[in-house]
Image (cartoon, helix red, strand yellow):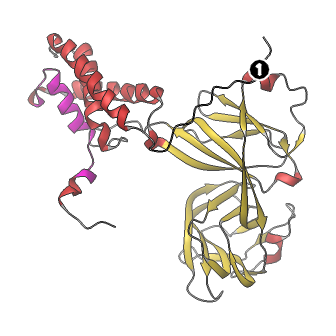
Amino acid sequence: MPLSGSNTGALRPYTALQLIEGATSRAGIPPTKLTTEIVEKSLDELNLVFTQLLNRGVQLWKRQKMILPCYLNQQQVALPAGVNRVATLTRRSMQRQTGTPFTTAGGTAALAFDDDLDTACTQTSVDPTNGTSIGCIFDQATQIVTAGVLFNVAAVIDNLSFEYSIDGVTDWTSLGSVQGTVARGQWVWVDLDGAPSALGWRVRCQSATQFSATEIYFGNQPQEIPLDPWNLDEYTSMPNKTTPGRVINWYQQRSLDNVVLYVWPVPNSQAIYDQLVTWVLEYLDEVSSPTQALDVPRRWYDAITAQLARRLCRVLPEADMSRYQMLKGEEMEATELAEGEERDPSRVNFDFGLDAYTA
């Protein structure tokens, strides 16, 4: 971690009010003339700027990795509401590693590692403060790179931590954790970056609900296969959309509230531990308060301010319309610079999509 220095101001949040004051000043409205109505209208226009930015598709800071489970006989895979679209998708399969199961709060630990989706290790007590654990002790040090839990009981999870112990007894260290509400029959997968080889691996759950796991999966030696997306015509033309197997194709339905993937073949018993590793583009967080920080990086501050200033000059009667053309030019220049910097320094590959087709 770098030492604190003169550039620490770069980390200070740029609030919506600061942006509005800068944009309205450019549009000919000094900060002393701002009213509640102007601020509210500016917030509305700012959120429209975010929508416009999303449509440009260049916001790399909103490109995130997600692990989607494969569920038995489930054709549709719904993504969270904040996802705009899926950019890439691979199917991952791994080697399952099992040792001697254990539980710290009752239940039959072996039932969480028996490949039977009709059984579960249900602990008999809870410890919301320190948590309770289910895991394995291995005969030799084993590296686990991805772990998953299939929940048997719905719960509100204060913290679900994936941990290792070098000797299998002491000094348990967390490599990843998640929080939130889980449903019965829901998988939670976590990649354990930087995982060492260790004798002990466990999942520790802090919740007011008893920890009940249908399956806990410790995996390594991952293999990922890139999967090509289908367009609507290709998916529609498939004569049997419920063919069972391991996913090799997918169609993306961008619905009103979220994105839904239609996968083919439909996961069968051979695919229940497969994961769909996706990179998605997310929506920018809506701004609802003047004190709220913006969901944009510092490199976009000037461009966002210029875009908002031009829009406000057009919609606010208090603005100086004679500045409109000047603001339009400033917006184009600032946006061009920001888009030019919004880049991945890796080499560029061109795919001309020269596939066979039927007219």
Label 1 secondary element: helix
Q: Position of residue 353 (x, y in %)?
A: 67, 26
Residue 193 counted in the magenta span? no
Q: Tell me if residue 103 comes above or below residue 24 in the rendering.
A: below
Residue 24 counted in the magenta span? yes
- Taking the image as shown, residue 186 lies to the left or right of residue 84, namely right
Instruction: Please name the residue shown 61% across and 83% down the image.
Output: 165
Q: Tell me if residue 100 comes above or below residue 331 in the rendering.
A: below
Numbered marks: total:
1
State which quadrant residue 242 falls in: top right
Q: Is residue 44 visible?
A: yes
Instruction: Please name the residue shown 69% across and 46% down the image.
Output: 90
* In-front residue for pair 132/311: 311
Instruction: Please name the residue shown 59% across and 89% down the image.
Output: 170
Chief SS of the magenta region: helix
State which quadrant residue 322 falls in: top left
State which quadrant residue 324 falls in: top left
Instruction: Please name the residue shown 78% across and 65% down the image.
Output: 95
Q: Is residue 293 visible?
A: no
Q: Tell me if residue 55 comes above or below residue 150 in the rendering.
A: above
Q: Position of residue 123 (x, y in %)?
A: 73, 75
Q: Position of residue 235 (x, y in %)?
A: 79, 26
Q: Position of residue 5 (x, y in %)?
A: 20, 63
Label 1: few (<14), some (14–19) or many (≥20) C-alpha neighbours in 10 Å: few
- Taking the image as shown, residue 22 lies to the left or right of residue 218, namely left
Q: Tell me if residue 162 comes above or below residue 67 in the rendering.
A: below
The type of residue carrying mark 1 is Asp
Task: Please give the residue where the numbered disc 1 appears in the rendered image.
Answer: 233
Which of the image's four quarters has the C terminus?
Answer: top right
Which of the image's four quarters has the N terminus?
Answer: bottom left
Which range of residues does the magenta coloring cover? 10-31
